[in-house]
Image: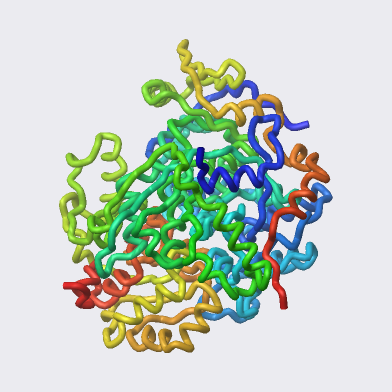
Amino acid sequence: MLEKFTEIRGRAVPLRGEDIDTDRIIPARFMKVLTFEGLGKYLFYDERFDEKGNPKPHPLNDPRYQGANILLVEAGFGSGSSREHAPQAIKRAGFRAIIGESFAEIFFGNATAIGLPCVTLAPEDLAILFQAVEENPTLEVEVDLVGKEVRFGGRTAPLFIPEAAREALVEGLWDPIGELLQAGELLDQFDRRLPYPRRSE
Amino acid sequence: MGKTLYEKVWEAHEVRKLKSGQSQLFIDLHLLHEVTSPQAFGMLRDLGLKVRYPHRTFATVDHIVPTHDRTEPFQDPLAQSMLEALRQNTKEHGVTFFDLGSGNQGIVHVIGPQLGLTQPGMTIACGDSHTSTHGAFGAVAFGIGTSQVRDVLATQTLAAQKLKVRRINVEGKLAPGVYAKDVILHIIRHLGVKGGLGYAYEYGGSTVEAMDMESRMTLCNMSIEGGARIGYVNPDETTFAYLEGRPYSPKGAEWEEAKRRWRAMASDPDATYDDVVTFRAEEIPPTVTWGINPGQAVPIDGRIPLLEELSPEERPLAEEALAYMGLRPGQPIKGVPVQVAFIGSCTNARLSDLREVARFLKGHKVRKGVRALVVPGSEWVARKAEEEGIAEIFREAGFEWRNPGCSMCLAMNPDRLEGDELAASSSNRNYKGRMGSPKGRTVLMSPLMVAAAAVTGEIADAREVFGIGR
């Protein structure tokens, strides 16, 4: 049985910027790997480190946000390539949920498939949350997937997530492989019926 | 009421509803490459599963392949290990693999259509976002992550959510020197990089109907840059003519039957769409990017926008882009110096792209100080270009003629920008660091515009450089 995600609580790290693409989340050169292990250390590598590997100013390098487990982002997060390496790196860097304004579709699907919930807030609520976290990095933030709200500093904001993804996460069905396999013989019917590329010679 | 191609394909492939409310969707064709598949095979092994229908799965190697010296072992041991993992995995599971030197190796989105693997009405998935390319044939084709690659290997299905469909009409005749690449950059510039979220894009109208298949592939390829996971064109006689006689295309009686089936898959004339947008071909100029996403683009004659011309939401990213690119608001894009010129990628490395450039490049020389590379999309494209004398035209002009692969587009092989070099590129992404240097800069444009930049050493209007239509 997979883990059920009903509520995630912790501190959040604010990452400003629209349309942050997966090349920035994890540059392509770190994808020359056969497993996802260890990808966490390359998260936002080129934004966090200079050519010599020295840290640059970046929220993820900021000591005040060390240990945060919720990533706060703006609109269009995760655009670009289909690399699952991107959500894998975020998860392996210790993040348990992402709150943003909107997510690119493949990124959203990849994140959900590995049990990393991505939820959105209305822009005005998100702006308040950003400000609150920037003013008080120790602020506790709660992502409640059952009550469908985000709570912080005495406020509550309704969260949005496609119902299919929410149910999958809450019920611990976020990895669909088991259910897909249950189709069994039905798959063979589709395989027999639907054409596929055939080489005649 | 009429249906769209998307709806028809969806209905034909929906195995059942899942508890989550998503659908289990059967995938006709699964394409693999070396970067996003090894972890999926690893997961398969951990679960004790096999590739369920190997006859529906095809693999090649493209992202990590050196384009200069392909002698094995590669100088990069990580790249070599990825190639070997794919060889081993495909062998173990009985999957067809188009290996280096097979004559069919190449960028996965170039070889699918070229071999006739890509066919109308299919669902096609691949662990690569530019799978949308195959939509040019009237297939529902989209990029997936590695966990989904595992799902498709194990079950030939995946859990999917139905999209809305936006019809994008392009009407009229493109001016000389204006190509599909300009059309898609123009569309993304106007609809935005997030404009397609939640939509499949159906491209149509007289401009698209008049396009050849390879232009349609360029158009569909960059749907993902507009936020749409899927882009497609309804199959027609142009599609059938392209497919006829290809190695994996249906033959004989099957061919006639296939054409009947494919025609019926096209969107009905009275199909309803969730949204309709129309562009005029005459209003589309050669278009180039100036920023750090493909939506930050301007006509070649245009200026980089002033901040006050942009909406408040667009400004922070514009400021970030200007700082990164080293450009000023209001500056003409024409004349910006270029250090690298790259013709290649799954967007524009097909034979027709190379033919078109060669037609104009003949007799011109790459400007001193510009590093110019042309990387054909596949071994087949390279071979044909050699036979037709195209390769020689590029070499004589001062381009490096390389071996096929993804190359500089994402720089997982040794081809990359150095420092803050600026590349005129026919690829699809101008993200920060995309071409392998954390400070490297990319300006996207059509292949002919890349050639014009190579010749002049700056961003230039190919119509002026090569005397087209003026």
Between residue B139 and residue A94, name the one nearer to us.
Answer: B139
Report the number of numbered marks: 0
Along the line of sight, the residue nearer the viewer: B436 or A42 = B436
User: In the displayed image of the protein, which residue is found farthest to the top?
Assistant: A154
Q: Position of residue A89 (x, y in %)?
A: 57, 45
Q: Is residue A117 above or below residue B88?
A: above
State how the image is colored: rainbow
Residue positioned 52% across, 46% down in the render: A43
Q: Relative to residue B62, is residue B24 drawn left or right?
A: right
Q: Where residue B296 sits in the image (x, y, percent)?
A: 30, 50
Task: Between residue A169 and residue B390, name the one nearer to us.
Answer: B390
Is residue B466 at least partly visible in the picture? yes
Q: Can residue B78 be seen in this view?
A: no
Image height of B82 relative to A40, above or below? below
For the point 67% across and 65% down, the residue is A197
Residue in view at x 37 percent, y 83 percent: B394
Q: Give the vertical position of B230 relative to A18 (above or below).
A: below
Q: Where is residue A28 in the image (x, y as percent from the top left)?
A: 51, 57
Residue B320 horizontal/vertical position (percent) = 30, 46
B385, above or below A190, in the image:
below
Q: Which of B242 and B316 is in front in this view?
A: B242
Is residue A145 rendered to the left or right of residue B183? right
In what quadrant of the picture does the C terminus of chain B appear?
bottom left
Q: Which residue is drawn at 38% across and 39% down?
A: A18
Q: Quadrant of residue A10?
A: top right
